[in-house]
């Protein structure tokens, strides 16, 4: 039997019990997050954060911890943690060297531009969002292997074992998790070719232990065989058989050919800060640099908060219009990154900004935007040496395509819906997609994920990122602005209510519970339509404070938790 390296069974379940107690209490509102003297992990699940912390305590570096956290999330956070999805990782080494890893999914070889249109040319979002045709070729396992090859210090097996134990022995569900699984596992039954009964046979309740034996076996094959354990052999056979039964496209050739890529991170400056973020195939980093670039030419203050929100919205309108026209996988489409973030361009783009009045989005000319579903997950890690990892990974929608690969126990992404399934046609969220991001074989679909690291005066300053589909870059922007311009700590900055706008629909979304009616009234007076909505993003971030300690910002919108020392 594999031994969970950190807990014996009793300790492990004791820990889970403690967690369920913690989560059944009303959280205490504090203005400061967990502070660590040396190292910190912040992720969407307490067990995954604990796994990361233990890897750091065993002498692993931030990348080792990131791999272990990624694998643990694939078990304990099935809505977005994954083996069957993809993502991006931004790394800053203690010596200041920066790297970014693109393990985004790719369209299968059999994919084509019109694959989601019916005979009359009408888009069929049901099949781009659910079921076997919705999946891109998964990138996560190759990405983790590549990250380990370049930066890993602990043996690969040590990083996978905690996830194996969590899958094999199970973990106790909180009330929120139990309800979530009961509601969404019905969809797994509907879309998987063979009913995954460990998810679907019953209604879950708090305290139930979720065991995932097939997933444990897949993780063992990955532990023992690395990349080959997933992209060939038994697991690949299971995946291809699942595709055949369900009418999907991914075949052995797609799996064998999949490759994640080291890419130059996208970098820019905001005042004294250097911003290190993700470039194409994510549009998120470009959007973030554009917003910070425009902000640098304006002054804002917390006292005039509605002016700041108006300014932010006006940027978002213009920038999200650019996103549709110009952003896509740069391996397939010449994304004009330099031009889009150039100071001169941003000044011109913002020339018609009126500080008193909203510009109707219809007056903003550019292409159209695709909006992604919002279930993704982000984690931030800083190790004792000062190496930092900012990593965002996704299945796209909640439980991705809702297809669980029979025999292999993992859920597949529905990332194909991040392509424009028909250029110019609104997707399921009512927004439009552009030509640059059309479906093409082997192409990566446009993303908004924005794992980001900031330096101040050449030293590590902040590690930040979030899920949230098209709201990702604007959430990262707000958290950065809260810290730098509004003097908030990391915890407070992450837990402030957020706003989002994206050109179309032509409104400002604000989170339920935002209580300053005067600010909303002021925005209304400038001509903005307002739209109350549920949570925007779940930011997990770390701030290096002046005294060298690390303050965690774990988003209380979810179960997000910091573990540090
Ligand atoms: N699927 C979410 C994103 O990539 O932006």
Image (tube, rainbow, N blue to C red):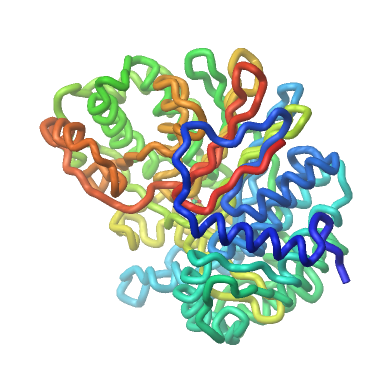
Q: Is residue 204 left or right of residue 18?
A: left
Image quarter (top left, top right, bottom left or bottom right) of the N terminus? bottom right
Residue 336 makes an appearance in the image: no
User: Image height check: is 275 above or below 249?
Assistant: above
Q: Is residue 208 left or right of residue 401?
A: right
Residue sitting at x 45%, y 32%: 493
User: Image height check: is 240 above or below 97?
Assistant: below
Residue 450 makes an appearance in the image: yes
User: Image height check: is 348 above or below 253?
Assistant: above
* Residue 97, percent from left and from top: 72, 25
The tally of labels here is 0
Image quarter (top left, top right, bottom left or bottom right) of the C terminus? top right
Q: Is residue 225 left or right of residue 544?
A: right
* Residue 426, percent from left and from top: 30, 58
* Residue 379, percent from left and from top: 60, 45
Residue sitting at x 83%, y 45%: 149
* Residue 274, percent from left and from top: 56, 20
- Between 534 and 242, the residue placed more toward the observer is 534
Residue sitting at x 86%, y 56%: 157
- Between 322 and 454, the residue placed more toward the observer is 454
């Amino acid at each position: 039997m594999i031994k969970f390296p950190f807990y014996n069974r009793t300790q492990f379940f004791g820990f889970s019990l403690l967690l369920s107690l913690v989560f059944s209490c009303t959280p205490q509102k504090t203005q400061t997050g967990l502070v660590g003297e040396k190292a910190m992990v912040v992720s969407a699940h307490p067990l995954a954060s604990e796994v990361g912390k233990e890897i750091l305590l065993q002498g692993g570096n931030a990348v080792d911890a990131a791999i272990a956290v990624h694998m643990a999330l694939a078990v304990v956070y099935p809505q977005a943690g994954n083996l069957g999805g993809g993502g991006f990782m931004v790394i800053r080494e203690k010596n200041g060297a920066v790297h970014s890893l693109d393990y985004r999914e790719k369209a299968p070889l059999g994919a084509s531009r019109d694959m989601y249109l019916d005979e009359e040319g009408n888009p069929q979002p049901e099949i781009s969002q659910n079921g076997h045709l919705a999946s891109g070729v998964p990138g996560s396992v190759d990405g983790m292997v590549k990250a380990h090859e370049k930066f890993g210090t602990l043996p690969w097996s040590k990083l996978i074992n905690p996830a194996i134990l969590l899958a094999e022995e199970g973990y106790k569900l909180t009330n929120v998790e139990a309800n979530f699984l009961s509601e969404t596992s019905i969809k797994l039954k509907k879309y998987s070719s063979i009913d995954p009964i460990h998810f679907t046979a019953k209604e879950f309740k708090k305290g139930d232990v979720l065991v995932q034996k097939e997933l444990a076996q897949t993780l063992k094959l990955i532990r023992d065989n690395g990349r080959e354990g997933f992209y060939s052999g038994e697991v690949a056979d299971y995946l291809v058989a699942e595709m055949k039964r369900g009418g999907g496209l991914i075949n052995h050739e797609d799996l064998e050919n999949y490759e994640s890529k080291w890419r130059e991170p996208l970098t820019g400056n905001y005042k004294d800060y250097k911003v290190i973020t993700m470039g194409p195939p994510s549009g998120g980093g470009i959007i973030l640099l554009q917003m910070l670039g425009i902000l640098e030419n304006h002054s804002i203050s917390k006292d005039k908060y509605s002016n700041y929100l108006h300014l932010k919205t006006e940027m978002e309108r213009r920038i999200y219009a650019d996103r549709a026209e110009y952003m896509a996988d740069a391996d397939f489409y010449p994304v004009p990154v330099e031009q889009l973030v150039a100071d001169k361009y941003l000044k011109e783009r913002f020339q018609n900004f009126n500080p008193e009045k909203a510009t109707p989005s219809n007056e903003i000319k550019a292409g159209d935007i695709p909006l992604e579903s919002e279930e993704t997950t982000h984690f931030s890690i800083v190790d004792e040496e000062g190496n930092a990892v900012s990593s965002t990974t996704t299945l796209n929608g909640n439980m991705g395509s809702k297809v669980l690969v029979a025999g292999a126990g993992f859920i597949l992404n529905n990332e194909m819906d991040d392509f424009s399934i028909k250029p110019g046609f609104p997707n399921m969220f009512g927004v439009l997609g552009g030509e640059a991001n059309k479906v093409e074989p082997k192409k990566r679909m446009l993303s908004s994920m924005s794992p980001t690291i900031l330096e101040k005066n050449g030293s590590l300053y902040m590690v930040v990122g979030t899920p949230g589909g098209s709201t990702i870059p604007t959430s990262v922007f707000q958290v950065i602005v809260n810290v730098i311009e509004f003097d908030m700590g990391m915890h407070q900055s992450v837990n402030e209510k957020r706003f989002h706008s994206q050109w179309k629909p032509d409104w400002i979304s604000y989170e339920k519970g935002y209580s300053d009616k005067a600010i909303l009234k002021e925005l209304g007076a400038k001509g903005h339509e307002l739209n109350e909505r549920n949570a925007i993003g779940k930011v997990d971030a770390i701030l290096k404070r002046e005294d060298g300690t690390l303050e965690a910002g774990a988003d209380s919108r979810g179960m997000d938790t910091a573990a540090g020392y």
